[in-house]
Image (spheres, helix red, strand yellow):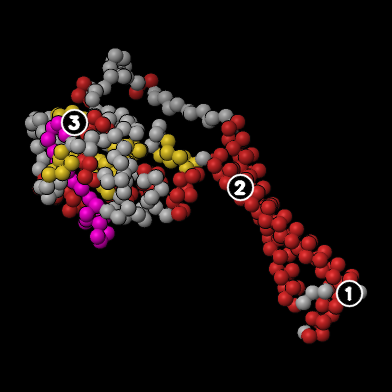
Amino acid sequence: MVEQAKIRESALGLTDREFAWELFWMTFGQIAFELICMAIKGVFVGLVSVLVLSLAPLPQASAQVSDYGQKQMGDPSSGDKLPKVLHDVTIEQHLNRQLPLNAAFVDETGKAVHLGDYFHGAKPAILALVYYRCPMLCSEELNGLVGALMMVHMNVGKDFDVIVASIDPNETPADAAKEKRNLVKRYDRAGTEQGWHLLTGKAPAIAALAAATGFGYTLTSGPDGKMNQYAHASAIQLVTPQGVIAQYYMGVEYSPNDMRLGLVEASHGRTGSLVDNILTYCYRYDPAHSTHTLLIVRIVQAACTATMILLFGYMLINFRRDRRLGLLASSAHGNG
């Protein structure tokens, strides 16, 4: 080993330490070059894929036609009409609308509160309008919400709050407390009880909140003929720490990924991990479909930026190596 080191030092003018550094920089440069080639290839393939998808014709849907004997004539005047009771049962997305923070409610403990008590500029919130004695849809909505939140790594109470408000002015804090026990039990995360806020209120406060969120509902009769049920749609809203509506999610089942990204966006990057915040750069909320869509342009931008960084690093490494070898060669020539 000693003899080899002396031969290498006499031939190249390099000590063992200098030779090791040169070997390291050469290896790193080779790896950087290969990464650059892979990045350029990925960008090219991505651009070609986007071009192909944009030029590809849409598939034609095939219609299913029933037999002649199965066809029945309907009333042409009634095909596009909703029942009168459902005319007001709609969800209008009021994005960037301020909630009525001065609206007065009562929480599940019987304490008088205002909606603004839950928006101090620190955490976002998920808002759901339901009624606790709802025989079907509301429980499905809340179960879907809890099921999605169970798959999100952020915690209720620490990273965001959940606010559930009843649209029935006849419901009581006892109804809200019972529903909260069910939700907290199913969520099953210790120390999160303080993040669930189940509210009841009087008709003016309920109407103000429903108007701000675009939540349409109407009183209707139940199976017993009594006017004690509500016809309503199903949606939840993500609200910023300042009480401004940021996003809507329709239906009774919600994507955990959308919930996670939506909470990060609603918090203006204060909630979630570094990876969550990076993902919000590549995904954008689509109000028309109430979901997050991947931005190919952002992916291409990120890939191009990474390519430029690797290329610059590769050029810098080679420049330093060539300069060092030149100095060593000059020194060896001078000594000779």
Residue under label 2: 305
Mark nearer the viewer, 1 or 2: 1
Q: CA distance from mark 1 to mark 3?
A: 92 Å
Q: CA distance from mark 3 to mark 2?
A: 50 Å
Badge 2 amino acid: Thr
Q: Quadrant of the C terminus?
A: bottom right
Badge 1 amino acid: Asn
| Closer-to-camera residue (331/250) | 331
Q: Which mark is residue 171?
A: none
Decide whether residue 100 is among the magenta residues.
Answer: no
Mark nearer the viewer, 3 or 2: 2
Badge 3 amino acid: Ala
Image height check: is 143 above or below 75?
Answer: below
Q: Is residue 223 left or right of 245 when viewed as pictured?
A: left
Q: CA distance from mark 1 to mark 2?
A: 45 Å
Q: Is residue 91 left or right of 298 when viewed as pictured?
A: left
Residue under label 1: 335
Which residue is at 22% across, 41% downward? 116
Name which of mark 1 and mark 2 comes first in the sequence.
2
Q: Which residues are magenta?
A: 185-205
